Image (tube, rainbow, N blue to C red):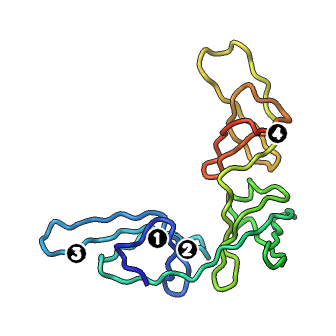
Amino acid sequence: MIGAGDIKRGFILDIDGAPWLVTDVNAQTPSARGASMLIKAKLKNLATGQAQAKTYRSGENLDVADCERRPIQFLYGQDTDYIFMDLETYDQFTLSTEILGDAAGYLIDGLELMSLLYNGQVLTVELPTTVDLEVTDTAPAIKGATAQAQLKTATLETGIEILVPPYLTTGERVKIDTRDGRFIERAKG
């Protein structure tokens, strides 16, 4: 149990037997004297992907979901399924594109990441903050085309497209921020 005034972004609450991730929290104090503080939370159901907003009074108690994070490794993708291995038990399991969402675009063979389990079932994966991917296709830079910084589209080995600086060429490896899909720098090594 946790007080509503103590919840923070990233907490996972157990609401009606389902795990809900707190994506945003705001505290609001009503203008009336003696009124208790209101906690407005945006929540995402980790099992269904449904989102909702809830308001709690600061004195309310909430249940914290019994979730476990475990290290896993991505093995390979097959059609719309992705096969992972638990690095503690060496058990293999499959997640679909629907469950992974945008995370599927950053998965390369051998990538180590974390899984989130609820009641022994894997709900989702947590990507590392950055991944190194190879540029498989990009247009050549046009010299002298502009005096300002420009970006061009590049397709990466996993099939996602991002914007990169004009000096990058096909075959180079780049470091990508998995939170927003933004180019960071050329990959080292």
Which residue position holds label 1?
Answer: 52
Q: Nearer the viewer, residue 15 or 139?
A: 15
Residue 155 placement (x, y as % from top left): 78, 41
First in sequence: mark 2 vs mark 4: 2
Which residue position holds label 2?
Answer: 45
First in sequence: mark 3 vs mark 2: 3
- The residue mark sitting in front, 2 or 4, is 4
Give the amino acid type for the residue marked by disc 1 in the picture. Answer: Gln
Quadrant of the frame with the N terminus: bottom left
Element under disc 4: loop
Give the amino acid type for the residue marked by disc 4 in the picture. Answer: Gly
Element under disc 3: loop
Q: Distance of mark 4 from mark 1, alpha carbons?
A: 44 Å
Q: Where 80 falls versus 19 (above or below)?
A: above
- Crowding near the residue tagged with mark 1, few <14, some 14–19, many ≥20 C-alpha atoms within 10 Å: few
Give the amino acid type for the residue marked by disc 3 in the picture. Answer: Ser
Element under disc 1: strand
Q: Residue at x 70, y 65 (%)?
A: 100
Which residue position holds label 3?
Answer: 36
Q: Where 142 falls versus 95 (above or below)?
A: above
Q: Distance of mark 2 from mark 4, alpha carbons?
A: 40 Å
Q: Distance of mark 3 from mark 1, alpha carbons?
A: 22 Å
First in sequence: mark 3 vs mark 1: 3
First in sequence: mark 4 vs mark 1: 1
- The residue mark sitting in front, 3 or 1, is 3
Q: Where 138 falls versus 156 (above or below)?
A: above
